[in-house]
Image: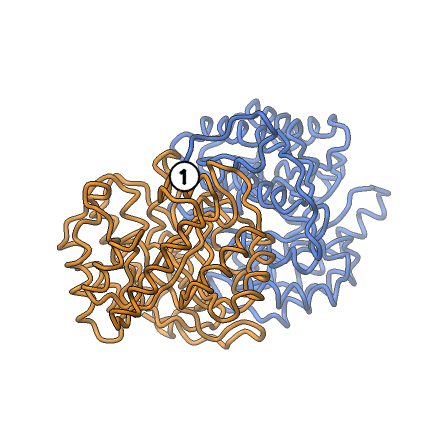
Chain colours: A blue, B orange
Amino acid sequence: MTPAATAPTPGLPRHVILREVGLRDGLQSIDRVMPTAQKLEWIRDAYDAGQREIEVGSFVPARLLPQLADTAELLAFAKTLPGLTASVLVPNLRGAERAMECDADLMLLPLSASHAHSLANLRKTPDQGVAEIGRIVAARNAAGSRSLIEVGISTAFGCTLQGRVEPAEVLRLLQAVLDAGADRVGLADTVGYADPAMVRELFGQALAVAGDRLNCGHFHDTRGMGVANVFAALQLGVTRFDACLAGIGGCPHAPGASGNVATEDLAYMFASMGITTGQDIDRLLALRQKVAGWLAGEPLHGTLWRAGLPRTMLPAGVAPAPLCA
Amino acid sequence: MTPAATAPTPGLPRHVILREVGLRDGLQSIDRVMPTAQKLEWIRDAYDAGQREIEVGSFVPARLLPQLADTAELLAFAKTLPGLTASVLVPNLRGAERAMECDADLMLLPLSASHAHSLANLRKTPDQGVAEIGRIVAARNAAGSRSLIEVGISTAFGCTLQGRVEPAEVLRLLQAVLDAGADRVGLADTVGYADPAMVRELFGQALAVAGDRLNCGHFHDTRGMGVANVFAALQLGVTRFDACLAGIGGCPHAPGASGNVATEDLAYMFASMGITTGQDIDRLLALRQKVAGWLAGEPLHGTLWRAGLPRTMLPAGVAPAPLCA
């Protein structure tokens, strides 16, 4: 159920949007290919649980990421669900052209603030990435497409390849992509290097640059800081967060390491604080159980699912989880 | 190693104390009895990793908690380690008498803010608990003992038995135990019901009542909020936190649910934020691995151990964990 109403918390936003990115960021890190039918069921169930923003896949060559080869089909289905914002990740102009052909509501363009990561991941320097974003904006405008363009600054808090990433470089790139015409920007802790103090500092500076065009925090939970980092960004007024059901994803080189912060744990935190997300936590947990079955053997994460909602958040008359006192 | 120095964060404390409570709060929730020799090694290794506050056990009848029957022996050993503050939990005057006989540096007295939990756990109402604390203070003073008395207000954020716990009741009890002569007080989220907004609100009010005699936050990570809750309390200036290595403990009725927030994850967060704890994270992780071997088959928690420290926190020349980019 949607938990019993809790009063909003003074000083915190009253509404937050959780974007489910498990179908893209989660599944791309898992070797096995989830059948399209299961992905469609995932999207359907997530929608029924109240999720209204879902990143369904990525327009990258299937030989690079066979796990995401069915993105066009998923996007077509997602477009049939009223009120759903269907995002896809696009790494370059070619991907953007496919996304616009498929009428994606939003294109998520990654731009790495780490020079080393940018070269390894996108085969471009960050500035070449900014130029490509400019070309995508121009193509989108020339085509009259209504697809929104969001740039996610990845490795914004550090990089496994390069180590430190200078905040000044993140802010410079943020300004550059805004100048290039991005509709929205977000900051991503791609490898789980952020702590809440870093989040407060960098998001604070980024908000000064981007204002309300900065509207997404993307936090990996690689070292257990994911929920705390979300809270730190929330305190600054950030109201959109990426998350993966069951915290799937992670890093192929750090076996068992978690991926994005778990959708269900964030939905619980927000509900507990009286912040609406539209999520039905029972349905999210039921979907998590389904996905866990599909991904049997893969490491899953998140914490709420073990204990369930606290008694204080259950409607009157609903029996709580077994006693623990 | 102790991570490379990070600059302190403006607005946050510069030093925090982590009290290891795994030997008490952790092991009491696990059916198997850890051999005394392993516990002694745990205390020794934790000390060598820089921990200077350890709750070694509890003076409760061995028939109730056979896992903690060797508390006197552990305390005797802990007392030989220079600069270590050795705590024990005592549920009543009889336990306090034993703790003082053994010259415990600190007695941790639990007082449940939930009437239902207090009756179930201590067989006393909260007010009867306050009266017992008064008797313990009087006995300590009469004996000329130097054992400090800390009262932990348990179920301060809600209770599995009773549901909601009124903040006003928590604050009333806090004042009552201060009036009864407790040296220190802390607030405990015994069943993992707290969120960061609740922490901010209740700790803020409690600090107004207790000032710097409020100096411990005890957070269970049952629903994934543990680290975020610690950060919320830290923002208010709280500088002592309980934690369990590997997040052991939890709840016998919620299989797999985690216990206290993991020591190693908190040590990492503080180090990353430039807050000193004196902890050597590599040694903590090595001890975690040892404890994991001793507790093979039990559910363990925490996140840092999978991925290790970020490259940005390794000294120059030390190879980072495998690349993830």
A273 over B229 or under it: above or below: above
Q: Is residue A31 left or right of residue B289?
A: right
Residue A63 in view, yes or no: no
Q: Assign the C terminus of chain A to one quadrant of the image.
A: top left
B255 over A206 or under it: above or below: above
Q: State the image coordinates of residue A303 (x, y, percent, origin top left).
A: 46, 41
Q: Quadrant of residue B242?
A: bottom left
- Work out whether residue B45 or residue B208 is closer to the camera in this orientation and state it: B208
Q: Quadrant of residue B85?
A: bottom left
Which residue is disc 1 drawn over?
Answer: A299
Secondary structure beneath dot 1 equals loop
A201 over A109 or under it: above or below: below
Q: State the image coordinates of residue B149 (x, y, percent, origin top left).
A: 35, 65
Q: State the image coordinates of residue A123 (x, y, percent, origin top left).
A: 57, 56
| Tally of marks | 1
Q: Name the residue at the top extreme.
A: A37
Q: Quadrant of residue B98?
A: bottom left
Q: Is residue B26 left or right of residue A49?
A: left
Q: Assign the N terminus of chain A to one quadrant of the image.
A: top right
x 78%, y 42%: residue: A147
x 46%, y 61%: residue: A160
x 44%, y 74%: residue: B15
The type of residue carrying mark 1 is Pro
| Chain containing the residue with disc 1 | A
- Work out whether residue B287 or residue B55 is closer to the camera in this orientation and state it: B55
Count neighbours of disc 1 (C-alpha within 10 A) and say few if under 14, some if 14 to 19, many if 20 or more.
some
Residue B315 in view, yes or no: yes
Q: Is residue B79 left or right of residue A70?
A: left
Q: State the image coordinates of residue A150 (x, y, percent, origin top left).
A: 72, 50
